[in-house]
Image (cartoon, helix red, strand yellow):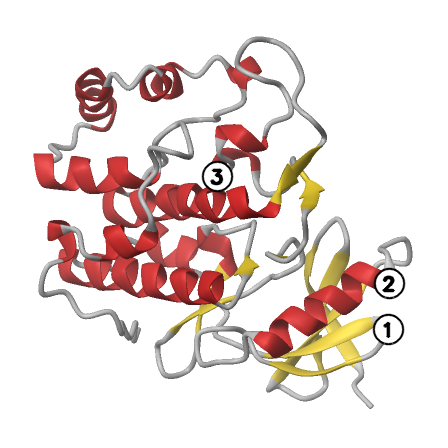
Amino acid sequence: MHIKTTLLSEGSSSNVFLTEDPNYVMKEFKSLYPASLRQKEAYILELLRGEHIVKLITYTDNYLILERLQSHDLFEVIKSQSLNHQLQKETCKSLIRIINSIHRMQVVHRDIKLENILIDKAGRIVLCDFGFAELLNSCSVKRTVGTLNYMPPELHQESLLGGMNSENINTQILIKSDVFSLGVTVFQIILGFQPFISTKPSANCKLWKLILQKKWSQYWVLVQKLSKIQIDPLTQNFLEQFIQPDTTSRASLDDIYSHPFLKEVKDDVHLIF
């Protein structure tokens, strides 16, 4: 029997509470959230069980009991500017390995972002919130899922030509969609800010338009002007691998893991504060 106490966060499908046991939190589903999606999240957490995935302790039809991690997420760590250049690289390489490993287990996360990367008591990074995750054996799923400013262009229902895509998307494409969202995450880890406002056509984002047209040299000139940060060509090329506008040009995580930017960088980062 687990008793919820203080509300920690509120989402569209669930709320997260502290419990009377300080080692656990409760993710309580809202009443309208379908039972099939609750069961799928529990199944995926069991399937992926490992040191870099938030641990599922037990579950019922109404809630999940999860391990309680440190109170700060990677967003707060980046905001505090507490990572030196080496730790930034180690964090990026660790994340690439973790996401690649869940893809090999036939799962896509669909909501990779700084806020969904937590830190355990040993300082290891831990991926959480699998509410949008999908199994790759599904043929087709809802297209527009995730967090807007991390979302790749193929997940917007509006096409580039002003028409409409299908409301659904084949799950195999979502591997490259995860790569893109990871790229937005990695960009922020390294540079401390987002690469664009939105990929949504109606957002009219100048930075995204340059990426869409693959005018990379102009993009980096504008980024450096806006951020007042000098970004070397190797870093630029590394980040470009993730956020290519079309899925066919976007690199695989195997290739990105071997990029010269990450040469001789370990992939088992421990963030101790």
Whole-percent x, y for residue 273 in the image = 30, 73
Can residue 16 be seen in this snapshot? yes
Q: Compute the Cα span from label 1 to label 3.
A: 30 Å
The amino acid type of the residue labelled 3 equals: Tyr
Label 2: which residue? 35
Q: Compute the Cα span from label 1 to label 2.
A: 7 Å
| Residue at point 35%, 35% (across, down) | 243
Direction from residue 11 to residue 71 in the image, left or right: left
Direction from residue 217 to residue 161 in the image, left or right: right
Q: Secondary structure at mark 2?
A: helix
Q: Is residue 90 above or below residue 114?
A: below
Direction from residue 86 to residue 247 in the image, left or right: right
Q: Residues within 10 Å of mark 3 (few under 14, many from 20)?
A: many
| Residue at point 60%, 9% (across, down) | 162
- Whether residues under marks 1 and 2 lie with C-beta atoms below 8 angstroms apart, the answer is yes
**First in sequence: mark 1 vs mark 3:** 1
Direction from residue 103 to residue 222 in the image, left or right: left
Q: Compute the Cα span from label 3 to label 2.
A: 27 Å
Location of the N terminus (image quadrant): bottom right
| Residue at point 29%, 76% (across, down) | 272
Label 1: which residue? 61
Disc sitting over residue 8 in the figure: none
Label 3: which residue? 150
Q: Secondary structure at mark 3?
A: helix
**First in sequence: mark 3 vs mark 2:** 2
**First in sequence: mark 1 vs mark 2:** 2
The amino acid type of the residue labelled 1 equals: Asp
